Amino acid sequence: MTLNNTNMGQSKNCIQLEPTRKIKIRVDNQGRVMYVNNYLTEFTGYKVHELILKDFSILFDIDMPKMALDKLIELVENEPKAFFIYKGKTKSGECYWGLLKSTQRIVDNELTGYNFEIKMLPAVSISKIDKLFDIIREIENNAGLDAANKYFEGYLEEKGMSFNDFIFDVTEINEKKADQYFSIDADNEVVKKKKSWF
């Protein structure tokens, strides 16, 4: 999968996702958007036709470091399930923070794309990750992407963490709690209740 971050627009103010709802995005293995759910269009202001077959990076905030985008690509291509900290943008340019869960789509033993679910990032995480993003962006702008990657490798090494450890440390949850968090979806609950009335 490749992502093109040239589509990103300048962010202004960050807004918050609803804690009981989640954004759902399906992309193909080239990173093109194949499907988005109603909550994404409702929350971001994009129309479905503005996103389908567009590069997924259209939804990334400009403050998302290139190194983070590369790490996301590496994770989704190599891990059947992965968690990631995501900074998105609305059509009007506002930003929002999310905890992203990716799963690979396998059809007939072939990787055909990826499912992304995004839920509200716990407030405790935002200041921690925002400071790190600032440092990484500054390194990228002044010394390049390779230097930013080296810094982040050193950062993880100093803390004795894998990337997954880092995500769960920043969010102050573990994988089991993250899976439980993603199982909450108010939109699906409404559908189930409506179906049960018939």
Image (spheres, grey):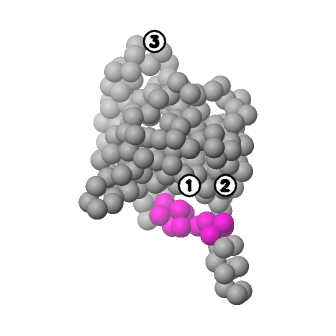
Q: Residue at x 49, y 57 (%)?
A: 173
Where is residue 63 drawn, in percent x and y?
Answer: 57, 28
The numbered mark, 2 or 3, whose residue comes first in the sequence reads 2
As measured in the structure, the alpha-carbon distance from the residue carrying label 2 to the one carrying label 3 is 38 Å
At mark 3, the secondary structure is: helix
Q: Amino acid at mark 1?
A: Lys
Residue for badge 2: 39
Where is residue 79 drawn, in percent x and y?
Answer: 32, 51
As measured in the structure, the alpha-carbon distance from the residue carrying label 2 to the one carrying label 1 is 8 Å
Residue 73 appears in view: no
Residue 175 appears in view: yes
Residue for badge 1: 24
Q: Amino acid at mark 2?
A: Tyr
Residue for badge 3: 142
As measured in the structure, the alpha-carbon distance from the residue carrying label 3 to the one carrying label 1 is 35 Å
> Which label number is shown at residue 174?
none
Where is residue 125 drawn, in percent x and y?
Answer: 56, 45
